[in-house]
């Protein structure tokens, strides 16, 4: 192994925790060193194992509690001393420093089109060089335009598009914004846990620690698409919410709960997806139709052990035994042209090799 | 009824190809998609395979092209890791990376994870289950990023050692 690239670097590289420059250094070392490549492959294999052990559905209703490690009394004393110093400074500072303005002001420029801002009760057109906004201001974007909002003290970038209206309620300590209409693409730098970025729409509220996502506020519903990280999303009228993980989308509308789906399903639904069953339940005699177009699939016959839940390639799977074992959906008339895809592993003697049967239409596939 | 030979061979090599693609892209969902596409192409081009050639290398060459195509889609630098990728198939060992071996190591690793101290287990869980980056773990645990980096290295090294010892005792 080259002395300048250690196993620690390789692990951080695999975990995507290195900067671009550091990653290039590791890649250069990998190109010229067969031993390092062998180590890297072994670490990749170990990482695949860890991934597999921790495979989850991607949605948690609540964070898993974790007790912070007990620190030594010396550390606690040091912490107490720092806190005392901080409190002293907090008391002393206002007496000697001039009153500061709002340091967390944001700058807005229009990438395309035009817009206005409401500041102190006045509606002002935003010039081509952009304008600074403060807490209490409202940004308006015209139809077909796109405004970029940058925070001066951190690398958070928001883009408001369409006929949009974004109100900056507070900017510190927590940033609290209200998307009244339009669509907001966001790339949010990591926020302190005690002061997350809070986004409100007429129907929903989202709590953001640091992530990349798109939030859209329509007349009757709010849609969220998370590309990286996670967003805590809930109804505006409720205190609780669900964590929407990366590559998932969620809708808040008149329904009782927040509807969270994998992005693939959400995008397929727009293209006419009828039914989607993941068989990840792991128990019971039904599997939920995530597309909601056909309804749950029932394991049949229910009185026998025909369907046994087992571990799948990803999440859970259904193991069907015997010639009568199957899953049945509700009665549905299939459209003339359709595609059906299924992940199936065959084992043992299998005479009938059809995957889908619709006796009503005499369809076997 | 046994699986058709071609399908069975593809399944036997699947894990090795996944490892190859994963080592290239470091993104498991993307790697799984590329392997799936690779298997489909291999199935369609079955007649083009010469028995003299190493089957894993043949699959990896298909996977490499699928990976290049994916990178092109993402408009990223393609030449950076070309040499690295082309040398990887030489390191692949089908038996070493078989499905059965993976399952055996997976079970052994699960046992090793149980033996970890609570804090180390939490760091691993937050990264692999919670999908948190190092900086996010550091913030959650009120530590520095450097601490997470070192902790991650020590924990993974301990897991690796424990795994090898478990497998060794299993074999003897």
Image (spheres, coloured by chain):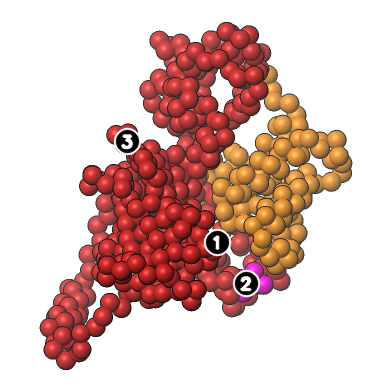
Chain colours: A red, B orange
Subunit bearing disc 2 = A
Dot 1, crowdedness within 10 Å: few (<14), some or many (≥20)? many
| Secondary structure beneath label 1 | helix
What is the magenta segment's predominant secondary structure? helix
Residue at image mark 1: A14
| Secondary structure beneath label 3 | loop
The range drawn in magenta is A25-29
The quadrant of the rendering that contains the N terminus of chain B is: top right
A60 in magenta? no
Q: Using residue A360 as the reference point, say whether residue A190 is left or right of it.
A: left
Q: Residue at x 50, y 43 (%)?
A: A263
Q: Using residue B127 as the reference point, say whether residue B26 is left or right of it.
A: right
Position of A272 relative to B130 (above/below): above
Of tags 2 and 3, the one toward the viewer is 3
Subunit bearing disc 1 = A
Residue at image mark 3: A254
Position of A189 relative to B25 (above/below): below
User: Whole-Å distance between the Cαs marked 1 and 2?
Assistant: 13 Å
User: Residue A116, how many percent across, how many down?
Assistant: 40, 65
Of tags 3 and 1, the one toward the viewer is 3
| Secondary structure beneath label 2 | helix
Q: Residue at x 61, y 62 (%)?
A: A39
User: Residue B124, how many percent across, how many down?
Assistant: 41, 56
Residue at image mark 2: A24
């Amino acid at each position: 192994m080259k002395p300048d690239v250690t196993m620690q670097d390789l692990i951080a590289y695999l975990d995507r925790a290195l900067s671009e420059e550091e990653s290039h250094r590791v890649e250069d070392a990998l190109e010229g060193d067969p031993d390092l490549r062998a180590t890297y492959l072994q670490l990749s294999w170990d990482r695949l194992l860890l991934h597999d052990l921790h495979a989850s559905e991607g949605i948690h209703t609540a964070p898993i509690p974790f007790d912070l490690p007990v620190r030594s009394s010396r550390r606690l004393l040091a912490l107490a001393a720092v806190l005392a110093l901080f409190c002293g400074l907090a008391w002393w500072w206002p007496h000697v420093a001039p009153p500061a303005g709002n340091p967390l002001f944001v700058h807005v420029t229009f990438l395309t089109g035009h817009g206005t801002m409401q500041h102190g009760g006045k509606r002002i057109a935003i010039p081509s060089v952009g304008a600074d906004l403060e807490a209490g201001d409202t940004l308006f974007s015209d139809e077909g335009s796109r405004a970029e909002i940058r925070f001066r003290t951190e690398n958070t970038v928001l883009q408001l598009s369409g006929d949009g209206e974004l109100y900056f309620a507070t900017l510190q300590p927590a940033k609290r914004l209200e998307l009244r209409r339009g669509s907001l693409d966001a790339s949010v730098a990591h926020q302190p846990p005690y002061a997350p970025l809070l986004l409100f729409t007429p129907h929903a509220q989202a709590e953001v620690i640091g992530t990349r996502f798109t939030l859209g506020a329509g007349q009757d519903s709010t849609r969220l698409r998370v590309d990286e990280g996670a967003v805590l999303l809930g109804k505006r009228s409720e205190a609780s919410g669900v964590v929407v993980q990366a590559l998932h989308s969620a809708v808040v509308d008149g329904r009782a709960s927040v509807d969270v789906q994998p992005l693939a399903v959400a995008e397929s639904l727009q293209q006419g997806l009828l039914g989607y069953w993941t068989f990840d339940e792991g128990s019971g005699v039904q599997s939920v139709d995530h597309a909601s177009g056909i309804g749950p699939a029932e394991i049949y016959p229910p009185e026998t052990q025909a369907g046994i839940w087992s571990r799948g390639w990803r999440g859970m799977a259904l193991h069907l035994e015997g010639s009568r074992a199957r899953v049945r959906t509700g009665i549905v008339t299939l459209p003339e042209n359709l595609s059906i895809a299924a992940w199936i592993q065959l084992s043992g003697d299998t005479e009938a090799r059809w995957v889908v049967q619709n006796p009503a239409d005499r369809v076997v596939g | 009824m046994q699986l058709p030979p071609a399908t069975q061979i593809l399944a036997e090599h699947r894990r090795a190809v996944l490892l190859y693609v994963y080592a290239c892209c470091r993104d498991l969902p993307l790697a799984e998609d590329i392997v799936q596409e690779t298997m489909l192409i291999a199935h369609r081009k079955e007649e083009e395979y010469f028995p003299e050639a190493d089957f894993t290398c043949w699959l990896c060459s298909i996977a490499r092209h699928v990976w290049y195509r994916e990178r092109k889609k993402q408009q990223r630098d393609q030449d950076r890791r070309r040499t690295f990728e082309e040398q990887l198939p030489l390191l692949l060992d089908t038996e070493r990376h078989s499905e059965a071996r993976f399952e055996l190591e997976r079970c052994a690793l699960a046992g090793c994870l149980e033996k970890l101290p609570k804090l180390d287990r939490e760091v691993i869980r937050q990264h692999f289950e919670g999908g948190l980056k190092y900086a996010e773990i550091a913030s959650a645990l009120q530590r520095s990023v450097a601490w997470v980096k070192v902790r991650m290295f020590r924990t993974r090294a301990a897991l690796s050692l424990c795994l090898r010892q478990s497998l060794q005792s299993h074999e003897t």
